[in-house]
Amino acid sequence: MSFSIVFPFGFCYTFGMTDLAQLVVRPATLDDVDGISKLIRSYPDELIARPPNNIIENIDRFTLAILHDEIVACACWQILPEIGNPDNTTVEIQSVAVKQELRRTHIGTKLIEKVLERIKAFKPAQALVLTFAPGFFAKMGFREIPKQKIMHKIYRGCIYCTKHADPFTCPEIAMALELPRD
Ligand SMILES: CC(C)(COP(=O)(O)OP(=O)(O)OC[C@H]1O[C@@H](n2cnc3c(N)ncnc32)[C@H](O)[C@@H]1OP(=O)(O)O)[C@@H](O)C(=O)NCCC(=O)NCCS
């Protein structure tokens, strides 16, 4: 099985199984900051910008997919505050990006599987995403939830967002995945 990608001017590159067999999914290190920054900046409409220092401060929460020494996908997570109900903890998955030319080759799936494995170690009740790609997360078992259920996320981040006037009319879809805790 192989994937052919046709670039402008007719240049075509074929990724064989051997290429994706080289994919390594691993936690990020501080050497990866520039590569992560570049990948996030390549999606200005879909992702919230992160200054390099924010990536440095959160580097222990990033997971990467690496192909031939290049960062081809990244994702981060953030434990959200839970007031009054410590049994209902939520981890938000953020900054999910797969390099444009490699989308739809299941790299995103492998990345999120690894992120969920890392998150489960903390035993939260659920994972949360706010996303423009609900179809992708639905395939990973996430289900849409009303934004009124994630007021901790709204107050922590969304109210500071300058992209949209109101978190409840923002086109990003809120989706959650319940996580087994045993
Ligand atoms: C969303 C994204 C991370 C998905 O990664 P990906 O590597 O392209 O996804 P995969 O190849 O693993 O897709 C897994 C399945 O979901 C489907 N899928 C992927 N993106 C989809 C989308 N936007 N809508 C519907 N289905 C989608 C794939 O077709 C595939 O289906 P299959 O198993 O039947 O073949 C990637 O497209 C991306 O970086 N998008 C831009 C940034 C973004 O929107 N990030 C999400 C913000 S939270």
Image: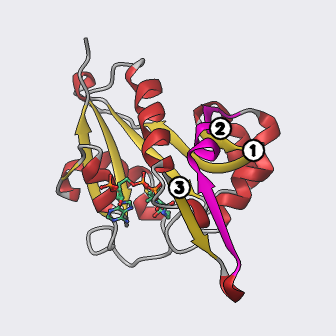
Identify residue type, mark 1. His
Compared with 136, 112 (above or below) is: above
Q: Is residue 18 magenta?
A: yes
Picture residue at 67% right of the left edge, 59% below the top: 39
Q: Residue at x 56, y 45 (%)?
A: 17
Res 167 quadrant in image:
bottom left
Residues rendered magenta in the picture: 11-28
Which of the two labelled residues, at mark 3 and mark 2, occupies the earlier sequence position? 3
Query: In x, y percent, where is residue 29?
Result: 74, 32
**Counting residues from the N terminus, which is met first, the one under dot 2 or under dot 1?**
2
Residue 165's tag is: none
Circle 3 packing at 10 Å, graded few (<14), some (14-19), many (20+), is: few
Left or right of 148? Residue 46 is right
Which residue does the image show at 53% across and 53% down from the upper left?
Answer: 95
- Residue corresponding to mark 2: 22
Q: Nearer the viewer, residue 72 or 179?
A: 72
**Residue, disc 3:** 2
Inspect the image, locate mark 3, and give the three-letter code of the amino acid beneath it. Answer: Ser
Dot 1 corresponds to which residue?
A: 68
Of mark 1 and mark 3, the one earlier in the sequence is 3
- Left/right placement of residue 91 relative to residue 100 reads left
